[in-house]
Amino acid sequence: MCGICGEIRFDGEQPSVDAIARMNRVLFPRGPDGSGIFQSGHLAVGHQRLKILDLSEHAQQPMIDNELGLGIVFNGCIYNFRDLRTQLRALGYRFFSDGDTEVILKAYAAWGTECVEHFHGMFAFAIWERDTGRVVLGRDRLGIKPLYISEDNGSLRFASTLPALLAAGGIDTGIDPVALHHYMSFHAVVPAPHTIIRGVRKLPPATVRVIEADGRSRDHCYWRLHFGQAAEDRERSYEDWQEITLNALRRAVERRLVADVPVGVLLSGGLDSSLIVGLLAEQGQKGLNTFSVGFEAVGDEAGDEFKYSDIIARHYATEHHQIRVDTQRLLPALNDCITAMSEPMVSHDVIGFYLLSQKVSQHVKVVQSGQGADEVFAGYHWYPPLQDSTDPVGDYARVFFDRDQAEFGEAVAADYVSEDFSRAFVERHFTMHGAQQPIDKALRIDTQIMLVDDPVKRVDNMTMAWGLEARVPFLDHELVELAARIPAEHKIAGGGKGVLKEAARSVIPHEVIDRPKGYFPVPALKYIQGEYLDYVQDALSQPAARQRGLFRDGYVDMLLQDPKQHITPLRGSKLWQIALLELWFQQHGL
């Protein structure tokens, strides 16, 4: 896990090494173990390294292979790199390091851009060809690793975070109206290629971009998720699917153990993270480090789920770490947490992951985490009603959208109000080939869009803020493909994630499986009051906010008057949503 950046010039000018250095400084927390800059001709790249595989300097980046005439900067982990190295050696390739970075280089030399189809893992990379000047950018299938891009007429810059690109300068920092509509509708999710900033885009997941020396480029989407059963699937029973699911998850968890440092687990106490711990224990892991975080209660709403995480920690005798965050610690950490966001993220548990990651990084460099199971195995409440929906787009919008078009018009300045971009986005996605049933359409958009730019981005940003690598076995692409083949009725059974729950009974205690569904609770950011209300009011009354004039005064005043009465269908604070966007702009000097 690392941070990468670069600049490619197409106008005959030299790339700015100073700009690369500025981006590298912003990326430092993602890779505090090493730093490097390389410049040749029209290309300059930077890298910040977190040492997880091959801890020696043989694996330092930027990595140059003079024999092949190739170079690379890479962020992520290729879990099957050892098997690939064996294959590549059989093809005659020689290796000078023991990590996964060089395997990507040799794989590109052997298979070209199709190399990505051989990778099991999470990745964002830039490969350049010395002799042609061609640069290839690539991102993993489910967008676990980020890659942001800014372009003008003479150059292209890329980086692992949006703030790194801002540090390089020359960015159009105006607000993208399409992104704003998505932000206000999809609880801050802004699907690729948009970002909230007009001058920054992101490479979509499962995409390879080939950039020629003259600036011409082409994108190729190398993976798509298809729902529905193959012929052999139609004879499988519910019990068969349970066994197949558990075996696939075993492989996914085992793959994510590859490391030259210890691997821990973020243990929320829910089914998903508990099952990861159980499968690691099943594979013989002893003295596993597990970590949970909790907050103070507000009114009747609890701020932690320690009683469930404690059950798993005791059952498997893990080295368990409970991290309790009181109000005095939460509020002062918010500004730093917001600074660590590549894009504004309103989910209340972002601050939880930020503070948890700070503590976890003092014990381990790598953790496994349970993100993705709810989207992949249908754990959310809005999936069952879509099983027999006659209006999939309307039904999805009613349960998922934070606001309809009318309220969006009441909330933001007139200059940003035009068409209903978010509903149109869902309509387009629901008509795409590969998902026939309404529930499958919802599962696909949540897995390939909403998941990528909410929980996945949240985990990446907050763990990497402390030099911690997070691995997500539920987003193993083979497991995701398998889940798409499982009949929807098996996934929504038992209140959601039925097939996963039943499979888990042979591994973990039933108390964790049969508990009420929980959410990562941070009540102070849902029911904004006291000093949190003061914090929000201060942000919204700053001269920068007044000058921006993004939100209508009447709407803001309504939310401030009684924040507890304005909660989204997915239980988020509408006040926190608009305040967070303004806070993010201010924290990044926009």
Image (cartoon, grey):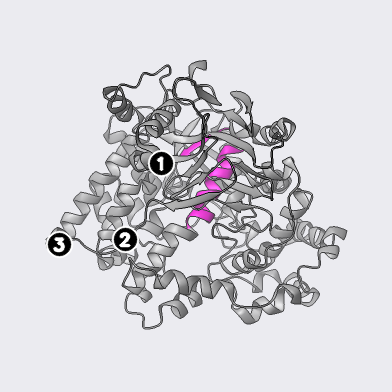
Q: Tell me where the magenta segment starts and ends, as one range.
A: 451-470
Residue bearing the label numbered 3:
231
Residue in the foreground of this view, choosing between 321 and 151: 151
Nearest-to-viewer mark from 2 and 1: 1
User: Which circle marks residue 113 in the picture?
Assistant: 1
Identify the element where label 3 is drawn: helix
Q: Is residue 99 magenta?
A: no
Asked whether the residues under the numbered discs 3 and 1 touch, taking CB atoms below 8 Å apart as contact, a structural biologist would say no
Task: Give whichever of discs 2 and 1 has the lower sequence position.
Answer: 1
Circle 1 Cα neighbour tier, 10 Å, few/some/many (<14 / 14–19 / ≥20): some
Can you give x and y, in whole percent of width and height, for residue 278 in the image? 32, 40
Which residue is found at the position 44% from the left and 69% from the top? 429
Q: Is residue 329 visible?
A: no
Residue 575, picture quadrant: bottom right
Circle 3 Cα neighbour tier, 10 Å, few/some/many (<14 / 14–19 / ≥20): few
- Specify the amino acid type for callout 3: Ala
Residue bearing the label numbered 2:
226
Residue in the foreground of this view, choosing between 72 and 324: 72
- Specify the amino acid type for callout 1: Thr
Q: How many marks?
A: 3
Can you give x and y, in whole percent of width and height, for residue 559 in the image? 72, 72
User: Which circle marks residue 467 in the picture?
Assistant: none
- The Cα–Cα distance between marks 2 and 1, rounded to whole angstroms, is 22 Å
Task: Give whichever of discs 2 and 3 has the lower sequence position.
Answer: 2
Residue in the foreground of this view, choosing between 413 and 555: 413
Asked whether the residues under the numbered discs 2 and 1 touch, taking CB atoms below 8 Å apart as contact, a structural biologist would say no
User: Measured along the vertical axis of the image, is residue 39 above or below residue 297?
Assistant: above
